Amino acid sequence: MALLIGSNRINIAVFISGTGSNLKSLIKFSKLKKSPIMIKMIISNNYKAKGLQYANIYKIKKKVFDFKNTLSEKKVIYELKKNNINLICLAGFMKILSKSFIKNFKGKILNIHPSLLPKYKGLNTHERAIKNKDKYSGCTVHFVNSRLDSGKIIIQKKVKINKFDTPKSLAKRILIQEHKLYPAAIMKVLSL
Ligand code: GAR
């Protein structure tokens, strides 16, 4: 990705709606000496998102927008441009971005999804994988396009589904893999 040429680190905005454990793993990745990224801001649609605490802990700028209409999204775009954001990482962000928003950052929005896409787009991925008696589930990092969970796949990690797995136990094991997968996906995108 041409993003890295001539600059030291690329500026990332992480979008979250909830716990923010993927955000935390990305922050840790950004703190490595040779990390290619800097997390410049955390954006949420939910002012109660637990993950917003990391903004205070790690002194990262945070902003909350409701994302309910074009005006709200325009404000987000303004903030992202003002802060020279090169790459947006959706990490447990549960709002669907508009086509026009995505167009503004074409090829520069990544998402992590808790299934082996193209299987199980949308919600309740673990329930569906268990119900269908799948042997494996996993997680995927992909580029975001205007169709839900359908952009080009960057990287995936398989996780075995055990006999006694519940959606909760499976989610927990997949989440551990997500934390490794997102940094790996960023490295891959930057070397493209
Ligand atoms: C993660 O499992 C992520 O893959 C999923 O939400 C969780 C957020 O956890 N994302 C989606 O379902 C998006 N459709 P986190 O807030 O602890 O990172």
Image (cartoon, rainbow, N blue to C red):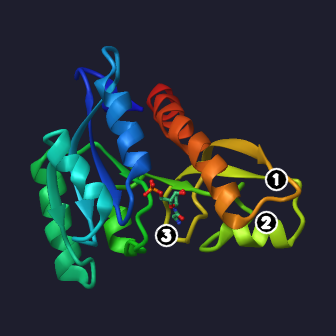
- Residue 88 visible in the picture: yes
Task: Give the answer, above or below, for where 130 lies relative to 34.
Answer: below
Identify residue type, mark 1. Ile
Mark 2 and mark 1 in contact (Cβ < 8 Å)? yes
Specify the quadrant of the image occupied by residue 6. Answer: top left
Q: Quadrant of residue 72?
A: bottom left
Type of amino acid under label 3:
Ser
- At 70% across and 56% down in the image, what residue appears? 170
Where residue 29 appears, as percent x and y from the top left, is: 38, 29
Residue pointed to by mark 2 = 129
Which one is in front in this view, the residue at disc 1 or the one at disc 2? 1
Q: Give how far apart the Cα atoms at labels 1 and 2 are.
A: 9 Å
Check contact, mark 2 vs mark 3: CB within 8 A. no
Q: Is residue 6 left or right of residue 99?
A: left
Question: Is the C-beta separation of discs 1 and 3 under 8 Å?
Answer: no
Q: Position of residue 56 (x, y in %)?
A: 15, 48
Residue at 30% across, 66% down: 49
- In the image: residue 1, left or right of residue 164: left
Q: Residues within 10 Å of mark 2 (few under 14, many from 20)?
A: many
Seen from the viewer's position, the closer of residues 125 and 3 is: 125
What numbered label is drawn on residue 161?
A: 1
Relative to 68, does residue 134 appear above or below in the rendering? above
Q: Nearer the viewer, residue 98 or 42?
A: 42
Task: Using the image, tell me which numbered label, if any, was put on residue 146.
Answer: 3
Outermost residue, top direction? 33
Residue for point 49% across, 35% down: 189
Tag 1's secondary structure?
loop
Label 2 to label 3: alpha-carbon separation: 25 Å
Q: Amino acid under label 2?
A: Ala
